[in-house]
Image: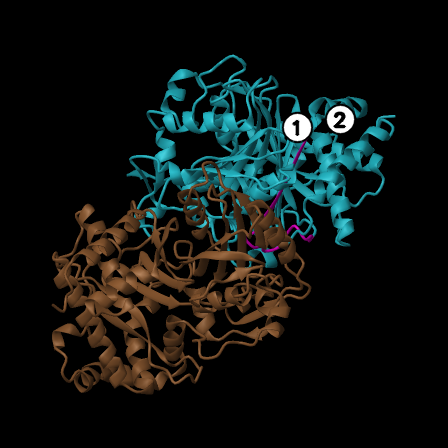
Chain colours: A brown, B cyan
């Protein structure tokens, strides 16, 4: 048995039937020249099941008995029950992307079994466009989205002729490729909530920090642009108790298209992501006659300009005003850029534990999501999390099959019924939108709204003019 | 909103992530002459989605908020979200029965969402034998196995030329075909646990009943054959706390083959079912070196020779000794027959509330399964439930497609890691074995063991000789 730190067990405690705490990923592969999706599926399956030695992470599960040890210790199974953990399926005709997204939606709402290693891989055939899909699912107590992405990357190669493709869990991968430096090891949420749990003394700093830090750092920035922590976000259909059914929507856009818009407006890549989300949320809520009068806010993980110390501390969270209450797209983008830039200036003016504490203060409402009634009765710190996870720009291959899309499938929870995560890989910005299906009807329309918002940003005059 | 009686809410209370409280069914259909499974699937899907009016049962869900109203009241949705409740999938190659059973196993462990009507239908293509499979799942608070079977039957016809096939939930079905008489409305478990809840006064009768009733009724029957309620069953791997993963195994045998064996040995059809289960469990546990020294016992629903009053009271539960400790198959069958016959004699000697009370006394340990620690710390009343649900003997059709198998997918729970349910439909005895996957490894071997046990019964000399 292995001790389980609170930064891991908290995801087991927070989990309930309506709020599964696993993260997922949907990958699309283009078979190599002359290979069918069916042949690629067979090859992946054969290689996956052929790994000689399994990494300990993939054998790990909460210890028994579940009621006591299950929250304090890990134990390891001897082997993987492949029939359970590696699942194969063929989509029904016509095999469109929406059939694939539907499969992911239906499966992402199902809890992982705690009496076995808490992950699954689904190999999905039947896409009419000839690609092979892979949906992966791992409990947040074992890995977060960033770690999961890194685990996947380890199986991929930039060389299309590399034929050493193997399973995620192959122990050999850990020997074969040296760990990359300077990537954050832990997600924001784990880092901060961990920080809260581990550094009690920090709580004092958090309490006194905000006005002081904001004052110190905002020299030259209008106070109205900066969203301080613990401010109440408006009530929206995104901030309600949820059921277990999920809807997953995913689509990618060429990063170059977003970068061109960013250059034109003198904005950052992330500003454009946020402006797309803002425009899309505005349309989505207007359709339902549920757009709040005040601007919605988003919590956004921010990477500090790190000197590569690799311990992951160079990440914090800011809250950005999405200006969803502004009809004119030009003013909306201006406000988003101002809010985002102000937040980053504040963060950069802070040091060490201060920036961590600001992040913790911004993230703290998440820690209370499992408390019954909390969602209904307390003010929200932000309306949703939007995160952007940059990956390698060059094309990646698994045994010659090109990775053609990598959509994050994140967590929806009570009070946070929607999450938008974007990975930037191989020249594409892959949007993954997860939402509570019953509480957020027609969620898939967000995709069209994202496109419409981007077109709008392409059409308006440069905001600096 | 509609009041939810305790006989329904108890299944919501008893449910947890490791113990989903839904019942399922796996149906196999042979497409009609000239029709492929794919065409049949399209036809079923089209007809299912075309039903004009939906029966209230299929719109029903626990009321919100889940924490309070969710256990005391029902409410009804306006319509079915077909994309969620009616799922289509194609099995991976080679499309063998074991691929189908695996799909059912993986899905039966997933909880139903309480924020929407608690049922699902999965249309499953890809079987190499050309049949179409349908897996249905409904929460036990909405319907039990018997009701579910009846709902299914309502959509079927004995006429292969009947083309009025429609969805389970089509309101028209309720108008079209008159309800059949004399079939029990409620399952045993609901009946008894309901009786416990509703008739507090009965508890006194239960407490005092057993020795008295046994004394009164067992005239002429050896005491050693009768298993009184509340006797401890031996500890076995079936009687442990469980995880959420399931393994489903299913197979059918010609009823005529079982009846021939019954005739030969002067036993009942159910005696032969029990003897098959006994022989199979014996082999299964011997393989694991876990066969208990004492005989295992089973709880068996028994239909009293009803005069067709149709209110379902003519059902009770008996406990039968399976003689798993007896190596010789001849003596084993003799002991099973004696125990089963003795139990039925006792039951028939009772009247009204007495037989119900005996049933309640036999069933009572199930009511405590949700209590933490109960399973580990208290004696078991029986090792598993075996139930036999007789259906119509004649062939049944949906729009000309013949129902070729109807396998019940029942509930495993803490302390009752395995359940065997048998439906007898269209000349076949369809065995459905559900078990906790992690706690009962290689459960599917039970199928071979059932066959071996039947062959053994065919080979031995008549036990009355």
Residue at image coords 45%, 60%: A22
Mainly helix, strand or loop, the magenta region?
loop
To which chain does the residue with label 2 belong? Answer: B
Q: Are marks 2 and 1 in contact (CB under 8 Å)?
A: no
Q: Are labels 2 and 1 assigned to the same chain?
A: yes
> What residue appears at the point 76 percent right and 40 percent down from the top-left corner?
B279
Dot 2 alpha-carbon crowd within 10 angstroms: few under 14, some 14 to 19, many 20 or more: many
Q: Nearer the viewer, residue A211 or B222?
A: A211
Residue under the image location 31 percent in, 44 percent down: B63
Q: Residue at x 37, y 72 (%)?
A: A188
Q: Which of the chains bears the disc numbered 1? A: B
Foreground tag (2 vs 1): 1
Q: Please identify the quadrant where the C terminus of chain B is shown.
A: top right
Which region of the structure is painted magenta?
B235-252
Q: Helix or strand or loop: what does disc 1 sit on? A: strand
Q: Which mark is residue B429?
A: 1
Q: Give left or right: position of B198 versus B252.
A: left
Q: Is residue A55 above or below residue B205?
A: below
- Residue behind mark 2: B267
Q: What whole-number distance in Å separates the C-alpha atoms at marks 2 and 1? A: 17 Å
Q: Position of residue B195 (x, y in %)?
A: 47, 37
The answer to whether residue B223 is visible is no
Residue B90 in the image, given as x and y percentages of width and height: 53, 38
Instruction: First in sequence, mark 2 or 1: give its number.
Output: 2
Report helix, strand or loop for mark 2. Answer: loop
């Amino acid at each position: 048995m292995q001790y389980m730190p609170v930064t891991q067990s908290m995801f087991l405690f927070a989990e309930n039937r309506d709020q599964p705490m696993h993260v997922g990923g949907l990958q699309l592969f283009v078979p190599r020249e002359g290979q069918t999706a069916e042949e690629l599926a067979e090859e992946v399956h054969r290689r996956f099941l052929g790994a000689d030695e399994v990494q300990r992470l993939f054998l790990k599960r909460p210890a028994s008995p579940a009621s006591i040890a299950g929250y304090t210790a890990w134990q390891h199974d001897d082997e993987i029950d492949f029939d359970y953990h590696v699942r194969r399926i063929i989509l029904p005709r016509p095999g469109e992307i929406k059939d694939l997204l539907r499969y992911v939606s239906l499966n992402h709402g199902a809890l992982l079994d705690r009496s076995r290693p808490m992950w699954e891989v689904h190999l999905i055939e039947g896409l009419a466009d000839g690609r092979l899909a892979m949906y992966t699912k791992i409990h947040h107590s074992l890995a977060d989205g960033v770690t999961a992405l890194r685990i996947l990357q380890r199986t991929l190669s930039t060389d299309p002729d590399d034929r050493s493709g193997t399973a995620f869990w192959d122990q050999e991968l850990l020997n074969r490729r040296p760990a990359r430096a300077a990537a954050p090891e832990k997600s924001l949420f784990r880092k901060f909530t961990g920080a809260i749990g581990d550094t009690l003394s920090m709580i004092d700093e958090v309490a006194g920090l905000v006005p002081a830090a904001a004052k110190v750092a905002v020299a030259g920035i209008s106070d109205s642009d900066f969203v301080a922590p613990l401010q109440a976000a408006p009530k929206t259909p995104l901030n309600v108790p949820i059921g277990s059914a999920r809807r997953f929507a995913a689509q990618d856009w060429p990063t170059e298209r977003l970068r061109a818009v960013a250059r034109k407006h003198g904005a950052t890549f992330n500003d454009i992501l946020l402006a797309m989300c803002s425009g899309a949320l505005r349309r989505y809520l207007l359709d339902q006659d549920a757009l709040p009068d005040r601007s919605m806010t988003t919590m956004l993980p921010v990477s500090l300009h790190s000197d590569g110390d690799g311990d992951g501390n160079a990440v914090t969270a800011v809250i950005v005003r999405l200006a969803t209450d502004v009809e004119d797209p030009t003013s909306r983008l201006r406000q988003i850029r101002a809010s985002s830039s102000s937040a980053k200036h504040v963060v950069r003016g802070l040091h060490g534990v201060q920036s961590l504490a600001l992040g913790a203060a911004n993230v703290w409402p998440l820690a209370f999501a499992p408390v019954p009634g909390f969602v209904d009765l307390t003010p929200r710190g932000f309306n949703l999390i939007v995160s952007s996870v940059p990956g390698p720009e060059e094309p990646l291959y698994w045994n010659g099959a090109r990775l053609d899309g990598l959509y994050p499938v994140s967590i929806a929870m009570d009070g946070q019924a929607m999450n938008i995560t974007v990975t930037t890989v191989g020249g594409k910005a892959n949007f993954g939108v997860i939402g509570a299906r019953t509480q957020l009807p027609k969620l898939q329309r967000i995709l069209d709204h994202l496109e419409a918002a981007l077109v709008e940003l392409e059409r308006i005059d440069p905001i600096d003019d």
